[in-house]
Image (spheres, rainbow, N blue to C red):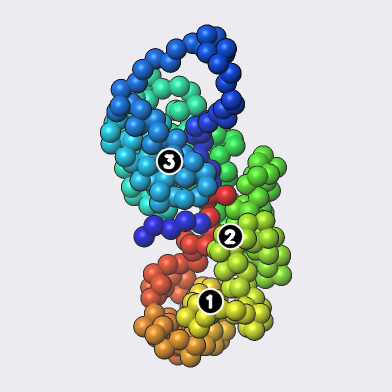
Amino acid sequence: MRRQIALICAALSLTACASTAIKPTDFEAIRPIEPQTGSALDISLALLKAQEDYENERYNESYDGFQLAALKSPDNLAARIGWGNAAIALNLFEKAYEIFSNKFGLDTAREEEKYAHLAGLVLAEVATGRVEDEEVRLNEALEYNLHDIRLWNALGQFHDKQKNWVPAQRTYLKALYIDPKAKPSVINNLGMSFLKQGQYNMALEKFQQAATLKPKRGLYDNNRRLTLVLMRDYDAAIDNLPQDKAADIFNDAGFIALNQKKYDMAESLISRAIDLSPAFNAKAELNLSAVKSKLNAIKIQDKMVLGTERSLADWGEYVFNP
C-alpha cells in the first residue's frame, strides 16, 4: 500500500530558473538553444514535474512521473533515482530495491549521482532485510551522503530497535544539527524513541512540536493522540475524531501497550476500540484475543502475531521523509 513515515528528502535535485521579461533589443545577445527531440523534451518536462511533486510530498504523482521518464529513457539515471526515492517515500521498499539494483549507467555517472544511488540502495536494502549489519551499511552510505536525513532517520530507528536509546537520541540530534529543515520528521522519530521507552511526557512534547511545525502531516497528530491515550487522557486523545478514527487510535495504543507488556492496559484500550466502532471488531477483537490469551496463560513472549501484523520494533509511525 502506498503510504507517505517515518526515513526524507531526495539526494537528487532538479533546478528551475525564474524568467524575467525580455526587451526586443535583448534577443541579439541570446545564444540559440539547441533543438530537442519531442521525446527528450517530454522526458525533461516529466522529470521537472516529478521532482516538483516529490518536493511537495505528492509522492504518488512523483512516482508516476519518474516512472514514466525512466521507462521512456532506461539510460536516464536521474529518472531511476527519482523513481526509487519516490518508492521509498511510499514505503514500496521491494520496488525501490528492484529499481536501485539496476546499476546501468553508474560507471559513467557523476559523483553526486553515484552517492544518491548508494543512499537509495542502502535504504531499500535495510527496509527489505537484505543487510547483515544495518549499522555498518548505513554508515557506509552516510560517509557520502551526510545531508540525506533519510539515512540518519534509518540509523536512529536501528538503534531504537536495539533499545540503544542514547545512541538513537544522539543520531536524531545530529540529524537536526546537520539539516534544521528536516526538523519535523526527525523530531517525530525522536518522539517515537521516547514513546517506545515509555517516556510519554517527552514523547508528547516531541509529537506536538512536529505537528506544529508541519500541521498538514496528519501522522504527527496521530502520534500525539496515541501518546495521550497511553497517558489515559482519553477525552483529549479523541477530541474531534469520528468514531472509526477514535477506534483506530485506541487499537493502536493497545497494540503499543501489548508490546510493552502492559497487558491490563492493552486489554482495556482494545476493548474500548471495539466499543467505539462495531465495524472495527475483526481487527480489534483479534488483538484482544491475543491479550487475553497471554493473561490467561501468564506467559510472556516477545514476538506475537496479531491482526495488525506488525511489531513495535517495526511500527510504521516512524518517517523517513521530512
On screen, residue 62 above or below 315: above
| Res 238 → quadrant | bottom right
Residue carrying label 1: 249
Q: Which of 217 and 207 is in front in this view?
A: 217
Q: Residues within 10 Å of mark 2 (few under 14, many from 20)?
A: few
Residue at 57%, 12% in the rendered image: 25
Type of amino acid at the residue the image marks with label 2: Lys
On screen, residue 87 above or below 289: above
Quick check: can you spot residue 100?
no
On screen, residue 309 above or below 190: below
On screen, residue 23 above or below 85: above
Q: Residues within 10 Å of mark 3 (few under 14, many from 20)?
A: many
Residue 4: x %, y % from top left = 47, 56
Residue at 58%, 60% in the rendered image: 216
Q: Which of marks 3 and 1 is in front?
A: 3
Give yes or no for contact between labels 3 and 1 (Cβ–Cβ under 8 Å). Answer: no
Q: Nearer the viewer, residue 142 or 246?
A: 246
**C-alpha distance separating marks 3 and 2:** 21 Å
Type of amino acid at the residue the image marks with label 3: Ala
Residue carrying label 3: 50
Q: Is mark 2 on a helix, strand or loop?
A: loop
- Quarter of the image for the N terminus: give it: bottom left
Question: Which of marks 1 and 3 precedes in the sequence?
Answer: 3
Residue 216: assigned label: 2
| Horizontal side of residue 242 vs 204, given as left or right | left
Give yes or no for contact between labels 3 and 2 (Cβ–Cβ under 8 Å). Answer: no
Type of amino acid at the residue the image marks with label 1: Ile
Q: Nearer the viewer, residue 118 or 91?
A: 91
Question: Which of marks 2 and 1 precedes in the sequence?
Answer: 2
Question: Which of marks 2 and 3 precedes in the sequence?
Answer: 3
